[in-house]
């Protein structure tokens, strides 16, 4: 007996609310980034702070990332359709990868520029106190938008929104560096400004690399951790009726998990009982991990990792019935035939009603006759006497 069943679960009705939440927090962040970028570029230019000027350019990259988020979230949170039966979350993953790439590019550009300045050791103008005011405003504003964005991202389970929150956090860290390096420059340690800028550039690159790496791993269908996989296998194997779990494959799509699992059950049970055992496994797995989107379970009568897979060349029911008619005389029309395809053999159970006046079929002779077929495994005959 083999049955394959897909069990899906998705809160489609929550998608519009998620899109609205993502849109609202991203638009607020984009407006804030635009204002802060303009403020820092003007203040850095007028009051002699190269660090604040570069930090302002960093803020404008946040505006670009916000535009990416708006476009991606509009598409990725749509419900599944005919062309995308599993949904559109992978578009969000690609958006996260693009956002991480932007962070890497910005961090690398800032690191290169400030490293050259540090090695050059050229004298720069001492920044003035308005730079401190602009940097403080940036720190407070970006830390607030980071916390707000991250809270929304966790609520709607969006890696892209969470990545955008961390992009805001890097801007806040950049402004912290500007704040302290400006104080140091005012005290005469001009090199602190440049050194701190190099360090924060490295932090930006690290965060961008982390998001890009995780996105690429998801796009190439990297599975769950070995610990989570073993937990799910243990849950399935402990379910009543499951003899073995010989294959469990997983992949991620955004925050969601997709599973394929092969469950070995007794070959003597009915298809419906095997299906019910699979549904019990599904329920137990979902209780363990609430972000499982889709479980595709395959019911097997034997472990095909140990035994060879059943050949498609084995006879079907019609061919087997024809063989039985050739070797069983007067085969009653009201018979039932149950077939078991195991270890590349066909094992049969034949249920018949025979009048009391007729002799019972010789199961041993029938078995010997059928033994000339390469596919034959065994036959069991069940009979009940009826009145003439």
Image (cartoon, rainbow, N blue to C red):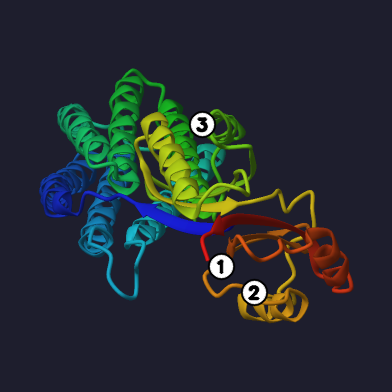
Q: Position of residue 284 (x, y in %)?
A: 42, 33
Q: In this view, does 356 lie to the left or right of 148?
A: right
Between residues 149 and 234, which one lies in front from this camera angle? Answer: 234
Q: Quadrant of residue 292?
A: top left
Residue placed under numbered mark 2 in the picture = 331
Q: What element carries label 3?
A: loop
Q: Which residue is drawn at 37% across and 21% down?
A: 188
Contact? badges 1 and 2 (CB < 8 Å): yes
Seen as rendered, the residue at the extreme top is 187
Q: Is residue 350 left or right of residue 273?
A: right
Q: Which residue is drawn at 53% across and 59% down?
A: 386
Closest to the camera, between mark 3 and mark 2, is 2
Contact? badges 3 and 1 (CB < 8 Å): no
Instruction: Give the CA separation, mark 3 to mark 2.
Output: 41 Å
Q: Quadrant of residue 88?
A: bottom left
Instruction: Give the CA separation, mark 3 to mark 1.
Output: 35 Å
Q: Is mark 2 on a helix, strand or loop?
A: loop
Instruction: Give the CA separation, mark 1 to mark 2.
Output: 8 Å
Q: Earlier in the sequence, mark 3 or mark 1?
A: 3
Q: Is residue 256 visible?
A: yes
Q: Can residue 220 be seen in this view?
A: no
- Examine the rendered structure and indicate whether residue 35 appears above or below residue 133: below
Q: Which residue is drawn at 54% across and 50% down?
A: 217
Q: Position of residue 75 (x, y in %)?
A: 25, 65
Q: Is residue 235 left or right of residue 343?
A: left
Residue placed under numbered mark 1 in the picture = 335
Between residues 38 and 325, which one lies in front from this camera angle? Answer: 325
Q: Quadrant of residue 362?
A: bottom right
Residue placed under numbered mark 3 in the picture = 239
């Amino acid at each position: 007996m083999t049955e394959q069943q897909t069990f899906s679960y998705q809160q489609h009705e929550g998608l519009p609310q998620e899109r609205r939440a993502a849109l609202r927090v991203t638009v607020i962040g984009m407006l804030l980034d635009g204002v802060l970028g303009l403020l820092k570029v003007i203040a850095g230019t007028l009051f002699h702070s190269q660090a604040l000027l570069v930090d302002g350019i960093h803020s404008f990259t946040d505006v670009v990332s916000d535009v990416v988020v708006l476009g991606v979230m509009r598409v990725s949170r749509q419900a599944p359709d005919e062309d995308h039966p599993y949904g559109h979350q992978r578009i969000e993953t690609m958006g996260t990868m693009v956002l991480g790439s932007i962070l890497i590019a910005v961090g690398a550009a800032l690191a290169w520029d400030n490293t050259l300045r540090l090695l050059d050791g050229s004298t720069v103008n001492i920044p003035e106190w308005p730079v401190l005011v602009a940097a403080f405003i940036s720190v407070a504003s970006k830390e607030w938008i980071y916390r707000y964005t991250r809270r929304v991202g966790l609520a709607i389970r969006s890696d892209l929104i969470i990545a955008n929150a961390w992009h805001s956090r890097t801007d806040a860290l950049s402004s912290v560096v500007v704040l302290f390096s400006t104080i140091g420059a005012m005290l005469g340690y001009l090199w602190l400004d440049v050194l701190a800028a190099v360090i924060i550039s490295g932090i930006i690159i690290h965060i961008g690399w982390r998001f890009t790496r995780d996105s690429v791993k998801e796009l190439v269908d990297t599975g769950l951790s070995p610990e989570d996989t073993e937990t799910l296998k243990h849950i399935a194997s402990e379910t009543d009726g499951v003899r073995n779990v010989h294959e469990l494959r997983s992949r991620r799509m955004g925050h969601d998990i997709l599973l394929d699992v092969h469950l070995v059950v007794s070959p003597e049970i009915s298809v419906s009982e095997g299906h019910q055992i699979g549904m019990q496994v599904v329920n137990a797995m979902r209780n363990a991990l609430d972000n499982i989107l889709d479980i595709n379970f395959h019911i097997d009568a034997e472990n095909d990792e140990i035994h060879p897979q059943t050949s498609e060349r084995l006879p079907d029911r019609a061919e087997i019935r024809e063989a039985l008619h050739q070797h069983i005389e007067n085969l009653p029309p009201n018979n039932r035939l149950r077939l078991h395809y195991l270890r590349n053999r066909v094992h049969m159970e034949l249920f018949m009603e025979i009048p009391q006046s007729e002799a019972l079929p010789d199961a041993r002779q029938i078995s010997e006759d059928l033994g000339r077929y390469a596919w034959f495994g065994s036959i069991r005959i069940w009979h009940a006497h009826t009145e003439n």
